[in-house]
Amino acid sequence: MPWQGVAAGLVTALGLVLQTASYFASWRRGLCPNRSLGGAIGFGLLAGLMVALVFVALIAAATLAAGQIGAAGAWLLGILVFLIPLATAFAIFYTLFAAFVAIFLATALVLAMIFGTLMGDIGFAATLVGGSGLITVILLVMSAIMLWLAARFSCATSLMAERRSFNMIAAMRESWRLTLDEQWVIVRYLALIAFALALLLIGGAALAGLGVQGFVEGGVLPEGDSIAGTLIGIAVGLPLAFLSVLVPAGIYRELDQGAMTAEVFA
């Protein structure tokens, strides 16, 4: 029924707001320990709502623009117009999650290419993304761009939390300045953590065996494998949640204090 879809969407949106609010409240409390807990929670809730509104606006605008461009025949440009704003927003607000998605997607596609080559099916990776080799290349390029943007904007959320500011543009500019000299070190740092999490997910999927294969092919896990899917989600989700708070805050504090690279990323 339509109302069930609306309810599911509202629950998902509420979950996104609360999860993001917990991140911002943690950054506010951690970076400004002398501030009150209630103030940190209030700031986090407002920040979470702001992030949700930013994503809603971006998705609506990107969908409209991509649809018009695609209708004119430039479907490749339409895909980029849709993906780039969303990738940038993920990089700003969800540094480690953006890095994880980028590395996991790139790793999965590269492994699919290697597997396909060994099995004599060069287009195997393309079949995973709708049968288009060009889309595979676009996704690989977008993964690299999103990882780089995550590094350059890795200080933005911590800056907003420490200053109790909702000025996203100012935070982006300051993060861009702070990460300029160490951007490739930060890229490697994020990639290493994200790759470890990706291996954890891929390893868990391999242990689940046919259940994962059924999920990829049919979109649903067989009933007997639902527990395995839940355990895989917990195994990856818990460290990802903790590191999503700790990693950006750590990068910001060390860069802002002017510590040596060896001390920051050892």
Image (cartoon, grey):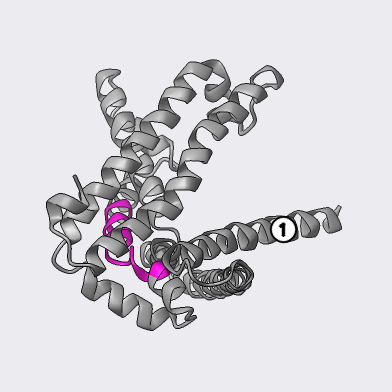
Residue neighbourhood size for the residue with mark 1, other residues' Cα within 10 Å, grouped as few (<14), some (14–19), many (≥20): few
Picture coordinates of residue 171, whole percent (x, y): 37, 77
Picture coordinates of residue 123, whole percent (x, y): 33, 33
Q: Is residue 123 above or below residue 184?
A: above
Segment colored magenta: 143-158
Residue 78 in sight in this render: no
Q: In this image, 87 relative to 184: left or right?
A: right
Q: Is residue 202 above or below residue 176?
A: above
- Residue toward you, 44 or 53: 44
What residue lies at 45% left-to-right and 20% top-to-bottom? 206
Q: Is residue 70 above or below residue 97?
A: below
Q: Within the magenta stretch, is there residue 124?
A: no
Dividing the image into 4 quarters, which one contains the C terminus? top left
Pointer 1 residue: 9
- Residue toward you, 53 or 130: 53
Q: Within the magenta stretch, is there residue 145?
A: yes
What amino acid does circle 1 point to? Gly
Q: In this image, 75 relative to 189: left or right?
A: right
Picture coordinates of residue 81, whole percent (x, y): 40, 69
Query: Which of the 4 image quadrants contains residue 153?
Result: bottom left
What residue lies at 47% left-to-right and 46% top-to-bottom? 242
Picture coordinates of residue 53, whole percent (x, y): 59, 74
Q: How many marks?
A: 1
